[in-house]
Image: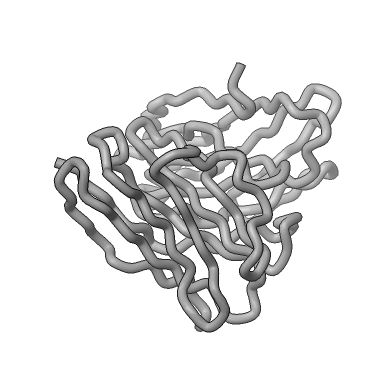
Amino acid sequence: RKEVEQDPGPFNVPEGATVAFNCTYSNSASQSFFWYRQDCRKEPKLLMSVYSSGNEDGRFTAQLNRASQYISLLIRDSKLSDSATYLCVVNELALTFGSGTRLQVQP
Amino acid sequence: GEEVAQTPKHLVRGEGQKAKLYCAPIKGHSYVFWYQQVLKNEFKFLISFQNENVFDETGMPKERFSAKCLPNSPCSLEIQATKLEDSAVYFCASSQSDRAIYGYTFGSGTRLTVV
């Protein structure tokens, strides 16, 4: 079983749509959780950290459920510029990456 | 500097040749991490350093791969006798701590193509 699992997608959504990505992790001792964004094989960039209480940054909302070992990312009012691969990342001894979920926002 | 600097951006090697990649972490960051990204977005952790000491090398292939972080020099990742399957983008990241509470900052990567 992979340590961090994500649906690879692609998710094809129209502009303005709301889209949600999910991720599960296997190591219950993991302590830090993140969503990264990667564009066209460029370097991954930190989108947001994920906290147990849930956190929001503009159109983006992240949730963590430690009991279920489940992380989510919600994007509201999708923009064309949101098209990218979204990586679920869990910190153990080093950052462990999911394989990413591809989002394509269409006009 | 305020960015992780990786060189070269692209590297082409024939099978069996040596490849050497460099990474200069953000000033003040004492942890350096190397990742390999092959097709399908799979990120593989290779090795991490705390200053010049190896912190975790559980991901490093035991044979052909080696890495160093020496004082006052960029960190390096070296692949002896490259194979076709080594073709990938190699990302370096740095952090102030191993706990990565604020995530890591990644360099723009070195794309290695073995032909």
Q: Nearer the viewer, residue A12 or B90?
A: B90
Residue B105, position as x, y percentages in the image: 55, 63
* Residue farthest to the top, as pictured: A1
Residue at the image position 53 percent from the left and 60 percent from the top: B93
Residue B50, position as x, y percentages in the image: 67, 64
Question: Quadrant of the rendered structure where residue B9 is?
Answer: bottom left
Image label count = 0
Residue A73, position as x, y percentages in the image: 62, 38
Residue at the image position 58 percent from the left and 81 percent from the top: B27
Relative side of A12 to B1, left or right:
left
In the picture, the quarter occupied by the C terminus of chain B is top left
Residue A5, position as x, y percentages in the image: 58, 25
Q: Nearer the viewer, residue B57 or A50?
A: B57
Is B15 situated above or below A57? Answer: above
Q: How is the image coloured?
A: one colour
Residue at the image position 39 percent from the left and 32 percent from the top: A13
Residue at the image position 47 percent from the left and 36 percent from the top: A17
Is B92 situated above or below A4? Answer: below
Relative side of A24 to B107, left or right:
right
Q: Nearer the viewer, residue B22 or B111?
A: B22
Question: Quadrant of the rendered structure where residue A52 is?
Answer: top right
Q: Nearer the viewer, residue B62 or A41?
A: B62
